[in-house]
Amino acid sequence: MCRNCGAIVGAGEAVCPQCGVPLAAAELSPQRRHVYDIETLRFARAVLERPHTFTLLFLAANLFVFLLMWASSGFTGSALWAFPNAVLDAYGAKLNYLINAGQWWRFVTPVFIHVNLPHILVNMWSLWVVGPYVEKLYGSAKFVFFWVLTGVAGVVASYLTVRPDLHVNSVGRFLFKTMDNPSAGASGALFGLVGVLFVFGIKFRHELPEGFKRAFGTGLLPMILMNLFIGYLGRGFIDNAAHLGGFFSGVAAALFVGYKRPGQRASVAVFWHVLQIAALVLVAVSFLMVARSFNTRLPASDEARANSEQQANPRVAAYLKATNDGERAFVDAFNNNEKGALDTAVKELKSLQPLDDTADALGSELVSLLERVKEIGPKPEKGSPRLVEQRKKLAADFRAWQEKHIEWARANREKYRLSVTEDEQPANNSPAGNESNSNSNRSIKD
């Protein structure tokens, strides 16, 4: 083959019949303008013809779990745009309080579940684009290890960043979360694969052909920066900590792992097969643990049953709606000095029929909080230490009320047929079928 133009040359030829360059000169000349393109093609053929079996398996597994979640939501059209929190809970979404209670498998299962149709479509398209490169360059055993490792690392990062006290400035709001909302998705693992390719392009830049140097390594920086910018714009909705946890774990792993070079023997060290099997067993055991408690956590998917349960608990439904509305009114008044809904919320709470001693006491306490926030002024820019202290005390009392409300919901799950999806917000504790709590992720800022 001519090293200048890539044409096939006969064994006895001294000059390339296509470009006329002497073969010896083509080999020795420093001005080989087309050599790198030819080398890129050779490298690409050697690498990209390899299989990417586990990319396809992971893609199929994510889609299969998504269909199961849709079935558990009653195959409704609305569920495609937002699975109920109870379904996310049942299938193993990350919830800190459940992990703290011993459900360790929630560090693993979120990598394979998604919250709605756009979420899974974007992530599976990304897996289809990025996954084959990593699996073909590193082999299936290393790819499986990378996927599970970086996915779990992303969940761990999300777990560690539920820190309302650090959600205070631009960086804090980018990384830290005020509430323990359900978190799920493969994006942490996908960012991990991007981290692997980023290191691959830099670490092996001296042996890669020009085309691969441009595609990986520093060539990925625009995409990485763009995704970080999107994450900044979507802070509060996007779990940026999970993305960064996945990315940096992928970077760290790739620093110590070599790739499968073209022409290299197909054999893989036993060590990597052991890690591959261990990763797959971890995933399987995690979902087995989900299955063990599945029926007890899954909400009723039959709409008629849900409606009948709600009708059987009219006082519970009214109580939850009133406390939900009161919570919303308090937060709007405290954060934004919007006090128009306070009187209506107080009237609604005072009109409730008795439910039980604890619930009645919580309702009265919320009325008191609403009356206090009505009298207090907005957060001062500076000075007014007395007002600052008043607001701090009111904020602490409101958070204490929220905790007591959560405990009431947990204690009365069976008594009132509550479908409890506890996100550190008692307004999320609603009877099956009650949609009045869909916007319950509320926190105060001071």
Image: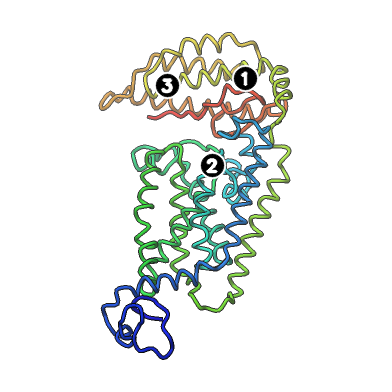
Where in the figure is residue 2, as x and y percent of width and height? 37, 80
Residue extending furthest toward the bottom: 12
Query: Do the numbered discs 3 and 2 sit on residues whose CB atoms are within 8 Å?
Result: no
What SS does tag 2 mark?
loop
Residue with the mark numbered 1: 359
First of labels 3, 1 by sequence position? 3
First of labels 3, 2 by sequence position? 2
- 235 to the left or right of 141: left
The residue positioned 68% from the left and 46% from the top of the image is: 290
Residue with the mark numbered 3: 332
Picture disc at residue 183? 2
First of labels 2, 1 by sequence position? 2
Of residue 438 and residue 386, the one placed in the foreground of this image is 438
Q: Quadrant of the C terminus?
A: top left
Is label 3 or label 1 in front? 3
The residue positioned 55% from the left and 44% from the top of the image is: 120
Query: Do the numbered discs 3 and 1 sit on residues whose CB atoms are within 8 Å?
Result: no
